[in-house]
Image (tube, helix red, strand yellow):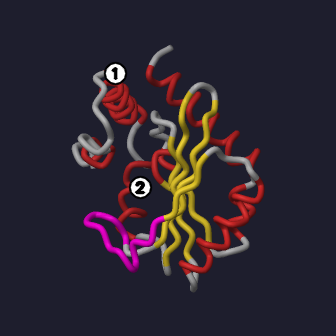
Amino acid sequence: MTAIEFSTETHKEAKTILDKNKIINLLSQLGDVRIGGSYYTDLMYGPDIDITVATDHPRESAVKFLNQIIDKRSFQKYQYGDFENFPREKRPKAHIVVLILPFNNRQWEIEIWFAKEHFQDQIKLEEKLKQLSPNTKTKIIRLKAKRQKLGIDKHSLSSFDIYKNFV
């Protein structure tokens, strides 16, 4: 399977996970939902999905969602982070819920950020990435495939580090 075929298959798997677990429906009851990252830009390779929920009450919305999703027992693991009260470098001052799910022999992560508003710098970058030519997107996907093949984790070579050479 080529890197592009793998990317397309990964996007289909992500859509299946989102649809099957009705995550967007649940989140929509808590605020304005935006699916971003490589799912939005058609640059998927790794098994991860990035979502932001803009809400007047980020902490309360995150905790409410976490309790709802735990009750459904649809995911193997759940993580919660309070980066508003415990800020971290290069992370938004917001709340995060991470859902972890083994699916099709891969470990999927869905990162859901709860914040007062969507992250404008991220949106600007993703809009530029979405507009890239198919040829440029192919180059990016191949670099992501190479990163994985070489066993380089996303903390050592982030997708953003790859993207900044193209936008």
In terms of depth relative to the viewer, which is nearer, 82 or 51?
82
Q: Quadrant of residue 56?
A: bottom right
Look at 29% across and 45% down and name the residue there.
Answer: 155
Q: Are marks 2 and 1 in contact (CB under 8 Å)?
A: no
Look at 66% across and 42% down and name the residue there.
Answer: 15
Judged from the image, the secondary structure of the residue bearing numbered disc 1 is helix
* On screen, residue 24 above or below 152: below
What amino acid type is highlighted by mark number 1?
Lys
What amino acid type is highlighted by mark number 2?
Glu
Look at 46% across and 16% down and name the residue there.
Answer: 2
Which residue is tagged 2? 126
Which residue is tagged 1? 149
Residue sitting farthest toward the bottom: 56
User: Which dot marks residue 63?
Assistant: none
Q: Which residues are magenta?
A: 81-92
What separation in Å lies between label 2 and label 1 (alpha carbons)? Answer: 25 Å
**Residue 87 forms part of the magenta stretch:** yes
Residue 112 in the image, given as x and y percentages of width and height: 54, 60
Residue 88 in the image, given as x and y percentages of width and height: 30, 68
**Residue 52 forms part of the magenta stretch:** no
